[in-house]
Amino acid sequence: MSADYVVNGKVAVITLNNPPVNGLGLATRAAAVDAIHRAQADDAVEAIVITGAGKAFSGGADIKEFNSPKALTEPTLHTLIRVVESSTKPTVAAIHTICMGGGLELALGCNYRVAVPGAQIALPEVKLGLLPGAGGTQRLPRLIGLERAMNMVVSGVFVPSEKFEDTALFDKLFAAGTDLVAEAVAFAGSIAALRPLPKVRDRTVDYPHHEAFLQFTRNTVKAMAGPYPAPLECVETVAASVTRKFDDGLKFERERFLQLAQTNESKALRHAFFAERSASKLPDVPADTPVRAIGQAAIVGAGTMGGGIAMNFANAGIPVILLETKQEALDKGLATIRKNYENTMKKGKLTQEKFDQRVGLISGTLNYEAIGQADIVVEAVFEEMGVKQAVFEKLDQVMKPGAILASNTSTLDLNRIAAFTKRPQDVVGTHFFSPANVMKLLEIVRGQHTAKDVLATTLALSKKLKKTGVVSGVCDGFIGNRMIEQYSRQAGFLLEEGCLPEQVDQAVEKFGFAMGPFRMGDLAGNDIGWAIRKRRYVEKPQIVYSKTADLLCEMGRYGQKTGAGWYDYKPGDRKAYPNAAVNDMIVEHSAALGLARRKISDEEIVERLVFALVNEGAHLLEEGIAMRASDIDMVYLTGYGFPVFRGGPMFYADTVGLYNVKAAIDKYASGRHGDAWTAAPLLVKLAAEGKRFND
Ligand code: NAI
């Protein structure tokens, strides 16, 4: 049963019941329509209360139906609202906890609304690149006014119910702790005989000189919306509530909604929404897998990463001990953490109380015995197998049984690290991204022997740390860095063939990346890639890299940390200024290679960089390193600044069409360094079958 029906005196109470948030899926809608009809037919019933069971009035559309035809199967949400609105007996929405999206639109279709304080009221559709498509844009302004409704629809943020006291949204706002249903029934009884029935659609939006306000809003929203069409469409539909008659406005809203739903931007946002949810699910780790309790954490290595990781634990309220080999390094690490928190406090983003709390949760030690009781230990020492070996052998001796032994390694073989212990089942990779206290991505590396409950615990922990956990198999670079290497290689070749760093960065940033490859290199430190390449020159001499990045490092230009990299930097200014000596070096290097520099289009730049990611992503899927295309997309959206409105590299490739992606790859395969472009067999297969990565 997804809507319960009881009669209380002369009032029928219909309770939406579809856990967890009473999403208005097909079965719930159908049950609600039946219940309304039943109440209409029951002579003993004089009024109807609609409410929600458990933790919500209603969270809106049922997300499970999002991309399925069920959402359009009758009774649709429109039909349900029409049935409610045309009821001959008065309807009262009794609102608590969560009333969002379609849930709010349903409430707006009722004759009356009553609520308790603290309920989250929102029309959040814009966050998925949509607009409220079931009358919300037309009815809400009629109750709370044009400006407030505009703000809510364009921003999608929720507003607590008590903030509407001065509006017509609620006919009664009860005190906190009230028995909502009992009071709603009493209210319904008190208005049962009143006629005519008030309908939101019959009200008008009064806003003198609305054109000036609307024009101002259009300008402001346009400047802020970036590549997304939805915010401006929200403005236009809310505007229709004042410029058009109700039914005309409703029709306009519907048209705009359907049009938005077809945009790549909305599809990308919805893809990202689902990708995030599915990333936390592993096919062979059931949802009810028991998790280990994490009440105390430890970090080995208080450097750049160790410090940031410790902050994540403290922010989540988990006490954490940092272990170092020398007092000096420990003091430095703890001081950096303190300074980071102080900076946040100075910006007004952290209270003194929270500061004290967080700093109080972090302690330091030079002694392994002090961390033995931690439930999880994250190793973040130098990226050298010998150092990792010494640390893991020691951890194996001192950590209590059942403790999770995690490594933050970004390139080393996790299975080898696990083999340094007698408990490889407890070893997992937790690859945080820098700065670890800021970046959302956490790659969770699953070793050959990693236990299922360790994975389940680490995934649950990632949520607690407010990270997006994505599971990767073991390989050099895992999902993110293995792909970025192909992207960086192409960026290097482009320099040799005719580009300068600025042109490449600008083309990629115009595509939507937060930062192009060269600005990113300067930020991360060009010496890191240099060190990795030096190792590769020995281990994998067959892989060809452009030497430009090495030449840059030989000039001592490591990036922002040395004040100079691909670009120049000025103190206190993160802006990148092109440097003539670097550009000369690039041009001279082309000449040394005997290459005639050519003009390269932005289109070619973007194709070569992005399709290099896609092709490597396809290899990862095929090898089972990544479980789903959407996991790869999540890695790139949360860890590499890939434009969200493009949905991630694999989703973007689906949008372009894999046939077209394959054709472009074949073209580059016949060009210079064509061996970098061997099309992944999975891509070839899907392209031939007309399929998508995300099917
Ligand atoms: P770092 O050099 O800033 O810090 C390493 C710290 O470990 C130093 O404070 C050092 O004193 C300490 N340490 C060294 N040996 C130790 C031992 N035996 N016992 C205790 N402490 C010891 O290095 P960073 O950048 O923090 O990297 C740490 C790990 O994180 C590496 O495995 C690296 O590959 C990985 N990583 C680094 C990222 C970055 O952007 N820096 C991003 C993701 C992962």
Image (cartoon, rainbow, N blue to C red):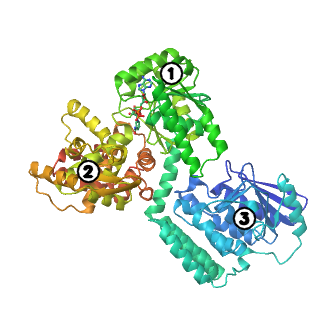
* Residue at 84 percent of width and 66 percent of height: 47
Q: Residues within 10 Å of mark 3 (few under 14, many from 20)?
A: many
Mark 2: amino acid = Ala
Residue position for label 3: 107
* Mark toward the viewer: 3 or 2: 2
Give the mark nearer the N terminus: 2 vs 1.
1
On screen, residue 478 versus residue 217, left or right, reads left
Q: Secondary structure at mark 1?
A: loop
In this picture, residue 192 sits left or right of residue 83: right
Mark 3 vs mark 1: give the one in front. 1
Q: CA distance from mark 3 to mark 2?
A: 54 Å
Residue drawn where x is 49% and y is 71% of the image: 222
Q: In the rendering, at what x and y percent does residue 543 appear?
A: 21, 38
Q: Nearer the viewer, mark 2 or mark 1?
A: 1
Q: Which residue is mark 1?
A: 366
Residue 678 or 638: which is nearer the viewer? 638
> Residue 434's spot in the image, x, y percent?
43, 42
Q: Residue at x 44, y 65 (%)?
A: 227
